[in-house]
Image (spheres, rainbow, N blue to C red):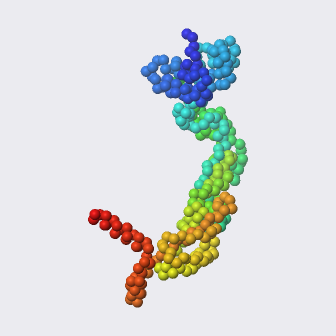
């Protein structure tokens, strides 16, 4: 029986992109997978047919030869290593299906290809939460922190073997870190149970680290916290994470900054806000007040007569520095007019007298109650 056109097998056009071809093959592989089609006797044949088509069309050189000569490109030696007549064998299946096997079945294979590259494993990254005050975030600071984690074993110099001996190749997997098992149509790879995917074993493990090549120990590190950091700022210290297995590279340490709340200032990016209570008399008459600044200094601020609660005044350049760059934010003073409490008899008498003389001195009240009167009049009519 004549072979079907490979493009027809996968259901794609002749000008389909590599991604479109791969997507089409993945769809066919799922649809005709023998383990999912036990009731379809033709599933295995269709699956092999799709595999053979993909094995050619995924390779630019094979695809070019097929586009020019068709199936004849791979007959009589013209195509070199292309698929042979009569369908793909297990070797061809492994070549094509390996590109999408992980997409179809996730981590079923036990993680990654080729255990030999896992002999020296990179250490894990670590996270450290560092609290700083707003003043420290303003100036920047050097802090010494203690970080618990794994470091390379001094006794075996990270090899995991006693006396510095080199690990030997795992006899179970021959150093590959994976073993293969035949399951019906499939040859499935799994992590080697003897060496746990390392590809090597230690016959005489180090007594200090039990063959791991690393030990747990607290380390003191100096951290430079730059000026302008905010909550959520991340500082990376390369190579200061967990030590790698069997002499592998160390991971990184990530320091996450948390700026504590301040009793006086509130921060919004580079801007600082300070709510300052002022007496009713000072707000009405105006005057000067003295306010603190984040650098520890003092600033005099003039309050205009007749100021209301919520009025803001800006102190240019008295905010927080930028983490990157040379700019500095501003500080905003927000007035909170304070109503006096615990009045004496004399104070009450003076306030009543003042109230009687205050006709026309409260424009906001007059405006509001004028609107209220119009609202009630409208309801009556």
Q: Nearer the viewer, residue 21 or 302?
A: 302
Given the current orientation, which residue lies at the most extreme left position?
380
Decide if residue 229 is in sight here. yes
The residue that appears at 64% across and 40% down in the rendered structure is 118
> Residue 129 in the image: x percent, y percent?
58, 59
Q: Position of residue 93 (x, y in %)?
A: 59, 23
Q: Assign the N terminus to one quadrant of the image.
A: top right
Q: Where residue 271 sits in the image (x, y, percent)? A: 58, 64
Direction front: furthest residue: 381
Give the residue furthest to the bottom: 346
Above or below residue 258? Residue 172 is above
Rendering coords of residue 187 (x, y %): 56, 27
In the image, 131 versus 328, the foreground residue is 328
Give the farthest residue toward the top: 1
Nearer to us in this view, 200 or 339: 339
Number of numbered discs: 0
Q: Residue at x 61, y 56 (%)?
A: 234
Q: Is residue 80 above or below residue 211?
A: above
Q: Residue at x 48, y 73 (%)?
A: 308
Q: Where the C terminus falls, by quadrant?
A: bottom left
Q: Residue at x 57, y 57 (%)?
A: 232
Residue 136 in view of the camera: no
Among the 4 quarters of the image, the one containing residue 112? top right
30, 250: nearer the viewer: 30
Q: Look at the picture and state if 111 lies above or below 156.
A: above
- Relative to residue 168, is residue 9 drawn left or right? left
């Amino acid at each position: 029986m004549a072979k079907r056109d490979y493009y027809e097998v996968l259901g794609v056009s002749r000008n389909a992109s590599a991604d479109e071809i791969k997507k089409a093959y993945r769809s066919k592989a799922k649809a005709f997978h023998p383990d999912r089609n036990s009731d379809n006797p033709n599933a295995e044949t269709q699956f092999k047919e799709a595999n053979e088509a993909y094995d050619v069309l995924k390779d630019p050189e094979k695809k070019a030869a097929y586009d020019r000569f068709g199936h004849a490109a791979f007959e009589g030696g013209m195509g070199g290593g292309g698929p042979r007549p009569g369908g793909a064998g297990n070797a061809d299946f492994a070549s094509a299906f390996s590109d999408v096997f992980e997409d179809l079945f996730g981590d079923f294979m036990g993680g990654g290809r080729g255990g030999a590259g896992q002999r020296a494993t990179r250490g894990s990254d670590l996270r450290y939460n560092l609290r700083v005050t707003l003043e420290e975030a303003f100036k920047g600071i050097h802090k010494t922190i203690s970080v618990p984690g794994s470091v390379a074993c001094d006794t075996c110099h990270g090899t995991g073997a006693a006396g510095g001996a080199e690990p030997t190749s795992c006899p179970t997997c021959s150093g590959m870190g994976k073993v293969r098992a035949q399951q019906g149509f499939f040859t499935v790879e799994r992590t080697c149970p003897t060496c746990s995917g390392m590809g090597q074993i230690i016959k005489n493990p180090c007594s200090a680290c039990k063959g791991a090549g690393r030990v747990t120990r607290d380390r003191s590190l100096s951290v430079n916290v730059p000026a302008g950091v905010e909550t959520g700022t991340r500082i990376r210290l390369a190579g200061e994470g967990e030590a790698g297995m069997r002499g592998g590279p160390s991971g990184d340490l990530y320091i996450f900054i948390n700026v504590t709340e301040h009793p006086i200032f509130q921060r919004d990016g580079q801007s600082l806000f300070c709510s300052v209570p002022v007496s009713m008399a000072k707000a009405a008459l105006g005057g000067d007040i003295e306010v603190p600044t984040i650098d520890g200094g003092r600033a005099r601020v003039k309050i205009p007569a007749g100021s209301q609660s919520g009025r803001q005044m800006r102190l240019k350049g008295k905010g927080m520095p930028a983490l990157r760059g040379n700019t500095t934010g501003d500080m905003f003073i927000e007035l909170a007019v304070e109503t006096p409490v615990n009045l004496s008899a004399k104070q009450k008498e003076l306030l009543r007298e003042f109230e009687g003389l205050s006709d026309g001195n409260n424009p906001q009240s007059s405006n509001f109650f004028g609107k209220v009167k119009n609202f009630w009049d409208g309801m009556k009519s």
